[in-house]
Amino acid sequence: MHCTVNLTKTHFSRISPKYTALRTTDIQPVLVIEEQLGGDEQIVAADVGCGAGRYDQKILQCLGDRLTLFCMDANRDMLRQLQQNLLLQGARNFHAVEGNAEQLPFSTRSLDSLFTFNAIHLFPIGSFLMEASRTLKNNGFLFIYTRFRSQNERNIWGRWFPSFSTKEQRLYEQHELEEIIKSRKGLEVESVKCFHYKRSSTLQNLLWKAKNHHYSTFDFYTEKEFEESLRRFQQNIQSRFDPSNVTWEDENVLYAIRNTV
């Protein structure tokens, strides 16, 4: 927990100006969420761990004026970037909120939906799920978009960047996450959707992302470890791919969880 708090304050503040450029934003889970909420005329929702608002921009575009969105993060620098980014895109029906996942700053039974994208592994999950059940209306939805440890091991970083998958132990496996959800009274998994993405990039771009620590996992390396691992990663890619066209597959999963209390 202490490590995660430090990452929130240091890593995400450091990369906040570049975060949107460094990370990939997938529209597919947002489209699934849009379909799930399709019958709701007015939606009050919150994105917990929103970062610089990459997914909020997509959600606001898909759901339009019927959505009132609270964008919540523990990092003020990320929230400043979010406000700049969303206002630049012409978004108005959102509110930037500073807060923690273990004590959500929302009233009981005030939300139709909660989202969290690639952030659940940074939360104290038991407290977060209790707060999700408290703040969601009866039959409201919690959507968790994440990746499992085994999925992380199979991507470009897990396979070819030395020690990446062993240093990243915050992620859950499917059975672990589902056991935790089932232990929380009132929360029921309604659907689980897996996504497979064909990715491509240049080696130069991958090295740029790693040097800028686009994943907080890289903060677990010492400076010497990172430099050596980066050198070996470059060798691994050069020996297996055309450096101008590096290809791989990313995997993610979206949970739709209904609140029944």
Image (cartoon, helix red, strand yellow):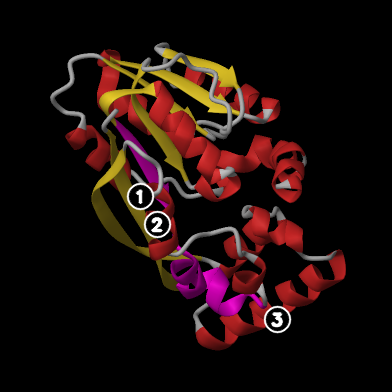
Q: Would residue 57 be visible to someone looking at this image?
A: no
Q: Position of residue 234 (x, y in %)?
A: 66, 77
- The question of residue 142 being in magenta is answered with yes
Q: Is residue 124 left or right of residue 56?
A: right
Q: What residue did someone put label 3 on? A: 232
> Residue sitting at 67 percent across and 30 percent down?
75
Give the distance between the C-alpha atoms of the residues marked 1 and 3, in whole angstroms. Answer: 41 Å
Instruction: Inspect the image, locate mark 3, and give the three-letter code of the amino acid beneath it.
Output: Arg
Residue 26 x, y percent position in the rendering: 37, 47
Dot in front, 2 or 3: 2
Q: Which mark is residue 179?
A: 2
How many numbered marks have been drawn onto this rendered protein structure? 3
Amino acid type indicated by mark 1: Lys
Q: Nearer the viewer, residue 24 or 71?
A: 71
Query: Identity of the amino acid at label 2?
Result: Glu
Spatial separation of the CA atoms under disc 2 and disc 3: 37 Å
Q: Quadrant of residue 124?
A: top right
Q: Residues within 10 Å of mark 3 (few under 14, many from 20)?
A: some
- The residue depicted at 59 percent of the width and 60 percent of the height is 205
**Residue farthest along the right direction in this orientation:** 224
Asked whether the residues under the numbered discs 2 and 3 touch, taking CB atoms below 8 Å apart as contact, a structural biologist would say: no
From the viewer's perspective, is 230 left or right of 21?
right
Where disc 2 sits, the SS reads helix
Tell me the SS state at disc 1.
helix
Q: Tell me residue 149's x, y (percent).
A: 50, 67
For label 3, the SS is helix
Counting from the top left corner in percent of width and height, residue 102 is at: 58, 33
Q: Which residue is mark 1?
A: 182
Q: Which residues are magenta?
A: 141-162
| Quadrant of the rendered image containing residue 115 | top left
